[in-house]
Image (tube, rainbow, N blue to C red):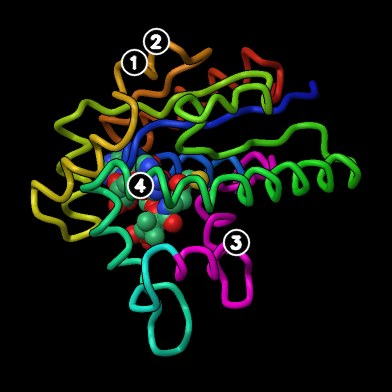
Amino acid sequence: MKELIIGLTGNIATGKSTISNMIQEKYQIPVIDADIVSREVVEPGEQALKKIAATFGEEILLEDGTLNRKLLGSIIFQDQSKREQLNAIVHPAVRKRMISKKEKLLQQGYRSIVMDIPLLFENNLTYLVEKTIVVYTTEDVQLQRLIKRNDLTEKEARDRMNSQMNIEEKRELADAVIDNSGSIEESEIQLINILKKWELIN
Ligand SMILES: CC(C)(COP(=O)(O)OP(=O)(O)OC[C@H]1O[C@@H](n2cnc3c(N)ncnc32)[C@H](O)[C@@H]1O)[C@@H](O)C(=O)NCCC(=O)NCCS
Ligand SMILES: Nc1ncnc2c1ncn2[C@@H]1O[C@H](COP(=O)(O)OP(=O)(O)OP(=O)(O)O)[C@@H](O)[C@H]1O
């Protein structure tokens, strides 16, 4: 089996987690998920959470001292400057922790690793990986799945989509694309073909 660090990206609700779970469970390639790491770095006691409270006010915390994600989301997805303020606090900590997780997995002997990073292209993080996969859907499918999964209004969903680079642009930048607009089975066939082409499975 070859060695490869893969960057998996896409847009909000195009299916990154669906594909990365498949890669981890069916093909035993470990996945480092930026969304999970971005939750770890804002746990109570973490520096990043203190900075968020200092910037957005103590009312951004719930009674138990954890981050009110719903409230913060409603602020930053409709205000670019607020989003940039949050990114400046959270992203350096996420990047640092992801690199350290990658080093640990390499030390444990893993040779292939997937880094699931929604903002891989926006934040110029391709230097962390060797190949990129974009999980794509048409904008219409993305919108419908996002509204359904997060129980959002169309405006809220569009604000979230507009806070990221357009999926058509990302598709152009990718080494490989999985079109997840159809069924999960159809997506798995595309994934298998990519993993075979990159000699990660037989
Ligand atoms: C604003 C927050 C609290 C909302 O939390 P919530 O639980 O509702 O969403 P969750 O974290 O699961 O993110 C869902 C999706 O939103 C998108 N997204 C999240 N943050 C951002 C952002 N700053 N810019 C663009 N898209 C984003 C991603 O596609 C992500 O997969 C949270 O998203 C956050 O802390 N964001 C900043 C960190 C970040 O950029 N994370 C994304 C990858 S590092
Ligand atoms: N092929 C598919 N057919 C039908 N529903 C799907 C398909 N792929 C994913 N979904 C559903 O669409 C929603 C978004 O998928 P998923 O959570 O994997 O996206 P994501 O890209 O990881 O999202 P985020 O950017 O928010 O982390 C989920 O509710 C998931 O169950």
Instruction: Please name the residue that numbered disc 2 is placed on.
Output: 172
Identify the disc placed on residue 169: 1
Q: How many angstroms separate mark 4 from mark 1 (CA)?
A: 21 Å
* N-terminal label among 3 and 2: 3
Q: How many angstroms separate mark 2 from mark 4 (CA)?
A: 25 Å
Which callout, 3 or 1, points to the residue nearer the camera?
3
Q: What is the three-letter code of the residue carrying label 2?
A: Glu
Q: How many angstroms separate mark 2 from mark 1 (CA)?
A: 5 Å
Q: How many angstroms separate mark 4 from mark 3 (CA)?
A: 17 Å
Q: Quadrant of residue 95?
A: top right
Instruction: Please name the residue that numbered disc 3 is placed on.
Output: 41
Q: What is the three-letter code of the residue carrying label 1?
A: Glu
Vertical side of 182 occupied by 50: above or below: below
* N-terminal label among 3 and 1: 3
Q: What is the three-letter code of the residue carrying label 3?
A: Val
Asked whether mark 4 and ligand 1 are closer than 8 Å, the reply comes as: yes
Identify the disc placed on residue 124: none
Residue neighbourhood size for the residue with mark 1, other residues' Cα within 10 Å, grouped as few (<14), some (14–19), many (≥20): few
Residue neighbourhood size for the residue with mark 3, other residues' Cα within 10 Å, grouped as few (<14), some (14–19), many (≥20): some
Instruction: Please name the residue that numbered disc 4 is placed on.
Output: 83
| 23 and 130: which is toward the camera | 130
Instruction: Examine the residues drawn in magenta and state their main secondary structure.
Output: helix
Q: Are marks 2 and 1 in contact (CB under 8 Å)?
A: yes
Residue 85's x, y, as percent?
42, 49
Region in magenta: 25-54
